[in-house]
Image: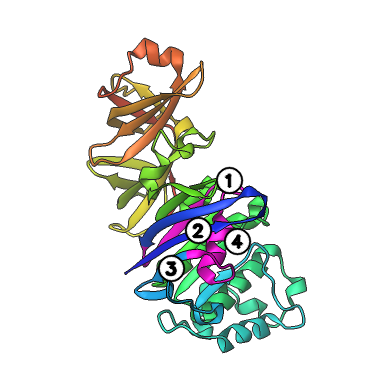
């Protein structure tokens, strides 16, 4: 089962969309790129809100081809916009009931009570949209979209209008939705942090075209793509919870043959999880030092390098299981250490965070 799309569209002002990509029929695929790269246009074409040439097939069902066109109301999409767009004359309960009445899809049915529980809306049902915070309104909008019974959830920068605190509060709810529902999601964003935390795959758009697509971990650590060059560049590692140290409130996460030590988390031993490690938090040493406060010292091979400017060098570091880290070091350090591709070194990691 998969999502397969190809769209061609010329618009006023010289912008031209010419994209084609495939994504798994479950999980979260992020459409990432700068403003004006075509992310929202792709979403609108999939929903049938904007007509383009090409094809659109969702888990075996053709929504658009050279010979057919499925009207937007028959496409069974749940669309969440940047602004919640709730009905102000209805209570939260009324908005959610409206979503239930619009059920068209059969693939992902969720009950009213389950939607309320999943998004923590029980205490908000009788309130009006005008009395809600921005994050609360978006949670209601997401629940309303889910209650329409979509086969595909489309999210157009749903966190862009929220401040940092509101984003942090809503992210766990989004993770619950994605983890507990067998529903494919296309998630538009220009925030690398959202990609790292929420997405399984990413489609990178530039000027109306697909520059790259693939699993998040690979795209984010490719030195030829924009992610690695960002100031907050990071790597995402898949791991398994290996145990806990109750005395020092630590959790151990195993990635391949390596053990990472992070602050205590509540996940069960054996649970699959993801770690995020920022390039700025990784340094390089030729030998293991035991007289250091750094707990995570991991053997790696330098896969490739990229000069960021006259003063800094970016390294992609390969772990024994094929996963990658990023490290940003000074050019002076790179020369002093004799850094070169294929070299065996140790990555000293000052911080790693659990993200899912």
- Circles 3 and 1 in contact, beta carbons < 8 Å: no
> Which residue does the numbered mark 1 point to in the structure image?
34
Q: Which residue is mark 3?
A: 56
x, y percent for residue 39: 55, 55
Mark 4 Cα shell of 10 Å, populated few (<14), some (14-19), many (≥20): many
Residue at image position (42%, 15%) is 333
The answer to whether one can see residue 270 in this image is yes
Identify the mark nearer the N-term, 2 or 3. 2
Of pointers 3 and 4, the one earlier in the residue sequence? 3
The answer to if 119 sits in the magenta stretch is no
At label 2, counting other C-alpha atoms closer than 10 Å, the crowd grade (few under 14, some 14-19, many 20 or more) is some
What span is colored magenta in the figure? 24-53
Q: Earlier in the sequence, mark 2 or mark 1?
A: 2
Point out residue 154 in the picture as x, y percentages from the top left corner: 52, 67
Q: Which comes sooner in the sequence, label 4 or label 2?
A: 2
Label 4 – label 2 distance at C-alpha? 25 Å
| Number of the label disc, if any, that sits on residue 158 | 4
Give the Cα separation between the discs numbered 2 and 3.
Answer: 12 Å
Res. 354 mark: none
* Horizontal relation, residue 133 to residue 245: left or right: right
Q: Which residue is the site of mark 2?
A: 8
Judging depth in this view, the residue of 145 and 270 nearest the camera is 145
User: How many residues crowd mark 1 within 10 Å: few (<14), some (14–19), many (20+)?
Assistant: some
Asked whether disc 1 touches disc 4, contact meaning CB atoms under 8 Å apart, the reply is no
């Amino acid at each position: 089962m998969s999502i397969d799309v190809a769209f061609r569209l010329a618009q006023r002002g010289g912008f031209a969309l010419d994209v084609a990509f495939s994504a798994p029929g479950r999980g979260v695929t992020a459409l990432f790129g700068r403003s004006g790269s075509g992310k929202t246009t792709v979403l609108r074409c999939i929903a049938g809100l904007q007509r383009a040439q090409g094809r659109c097939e969702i888990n075996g069902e053709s929504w658009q081809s050279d010979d057919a066109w499925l009207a937007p109301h028959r496409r069974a999409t749940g669309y969440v916009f940047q602004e919640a767009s709730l009905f102000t004359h209805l209570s939260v309960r009324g908005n959610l009931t409206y979503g239930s009445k619009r059920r068209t899809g059969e693939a992902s049915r969720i009950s009213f009570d389950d939607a309320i529980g999943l998004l923590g809306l029980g205490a908000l049902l009788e309130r009006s949209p005008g009395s809600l915070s921005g994050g609360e309104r978006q949670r209601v909008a997401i629940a309303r979209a889910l209650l329409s019974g979509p086969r595909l959830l489309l999210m157009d920068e749903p966190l862009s209008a929220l401040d940092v605190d509101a984003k942090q509060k809503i992210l766990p709810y989004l993770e619950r939705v994605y983890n507990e529902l067998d529903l494919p999601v296309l998630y538009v964003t220009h925030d690398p942090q959202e990609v790292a935390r929420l997405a399984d795959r990413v489609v990178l758009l530039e000027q109306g075209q697909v520059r790259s697509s693939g699993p998040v971990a690979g795209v984010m650590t490719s030195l030829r793509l924009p992610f690695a060059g960002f100031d907050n560049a990071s790597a995402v590692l898949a791991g398994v919870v290996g145990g806990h140290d109750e005395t020092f409130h630590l959790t151990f996460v195993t990635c391949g043959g390596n053990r990472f030590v992070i602050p205590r988390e509540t996940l069960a031993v054996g649970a699959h999880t993801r770690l995020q490690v920022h390039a700025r938090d990784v340094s390089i040493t030729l030998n293991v030092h035991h007289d250091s406060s750094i707990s995570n010292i991991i053997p790696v091979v330098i896969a490739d390098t990229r000069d960021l400017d006259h003063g800094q060098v970016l390294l992609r570091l390969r772990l024994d299981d094929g996963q990658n880290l990023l490290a940003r070091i000074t050019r002076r350090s790179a020369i002093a250490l004799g850094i070169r591709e294929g070299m065996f070194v140790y990555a000293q990691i000052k911080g790693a965070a659990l993200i899912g």
